[in-house]
Amino acid sequence: MNKNIAAIILAAGKGTRMKCKERNKVTIPFLNKPLIVYAVELMINIASPVVVVAGAFKESVRQVLKKYPVVYAFQKKRLGTGHAVKVGLSAIAKLKTVPELILVGYGDHMMFYDQEVIKKLLDLHQKKQPAISLITFEYDRPNLLKYGRIIRDKNGFITGIVEQKNASPKQKLIKEVNPGFYCFDYLFLKKYLNQIRKSAVGEYYLTDLVEIAAAHNFKTIGLKIPFEKAGLGINTFEELKESEKIYIKKNGH
């Protein structure tokens, strides 16, 4: 556990597509263990504090995490990932801790990552000193995943992440995608998070920080890993079943 690294796990969404009526999506079992437990178990060995940003059905999240030493932050209005991270940062500030780095990931998408991958990301970040480091992977049929595409400049630095629905036909051909696991320089995040502009649907997207970083001459770098080490995020029951299959195949049980 590293006092210089804090973590924020995003777990406030409603899980609309999974028709969650009484529980948060992140509490749904993935091979008999709630999705968010994978996220917390990964993070508590690396970071302190670990902040869980809860929102919809927050009591169900507390219930499955009651034996874990996490800090809760509550996102009253769901205004997107950028806003959720802001809520998480406020909780860190209240603890009067000043970390160097902030890891951010999704409560429904950390089943596949392991300590080794996160350590590689942290090592890369500390070696290259960018404002943002993030995990990427390549997928032959990226349109199936609906993930944001990674835009790189001629030097290989990441200058943008374009969501599939906003991507041009040419951008849709990009196979390198963003599964949503980040390492931010804390001071950069604190300073520039407020510069994210509200989207057309009224949300603040964390991925906009990549463009903001580029506009201020800060670097964003990517750690490309095999798909099997990133896996799928879970938005539907079909994805849950598919993801479990990939996990069993990867882990040989």
Image: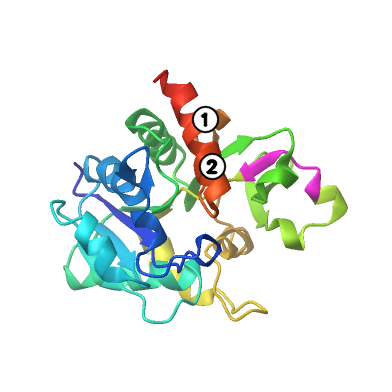
Q: Residue at x 33, y 66 (%)?
A: 53
| Residue receiving disc 2 | 232
For the question of whether residue 179 can be seen, the reply is no
Q: Residue furthest top?
A: 252
Circles 1 and 2, Cβ within 8 Å, touching? The answer is yes
> Is 187 located above or below residue 139 in the figure?
below
| Residue receiving disc 1 | 246
Q: Residue at x 35, y 65 (%)?
A: 23
Disc 1 crowd rating (10 Å Cα; few below 14, some 14-19, many 20+) is some
Q: Residue at x 52, y 29 (%)?
A: 228
| Image position, residue 50 (x, y; %) | 24, 55
| Image position, residue 213 (x, y; %) | 56, 60
| Image position, residue 120 (x, y; %) | 41, 31
**How many numbered circles does the render carry?**
2
Kind of residue sitting beneath label 2? Leu
Is residue 89 in the magenta section?
Answer: no
Q: Residue at x 64, y 79 (%)?
A: 201
- Residue 196 or 242: which is nearer the viewer? 242
- Residue 140 or 26: which is nearer the viewer? 26
> Is 88 located above or below residue 77 in the figure?
above
Q: Which mark is residue 234?
A: none
Give the image quarter of residue 77.
bottom left
The region drawn magenta spans 172-177
Q: Secondary structure at mark 1?
A: helix
Q: Which is closer to the viewer, label 1 or label 2?
A: 1
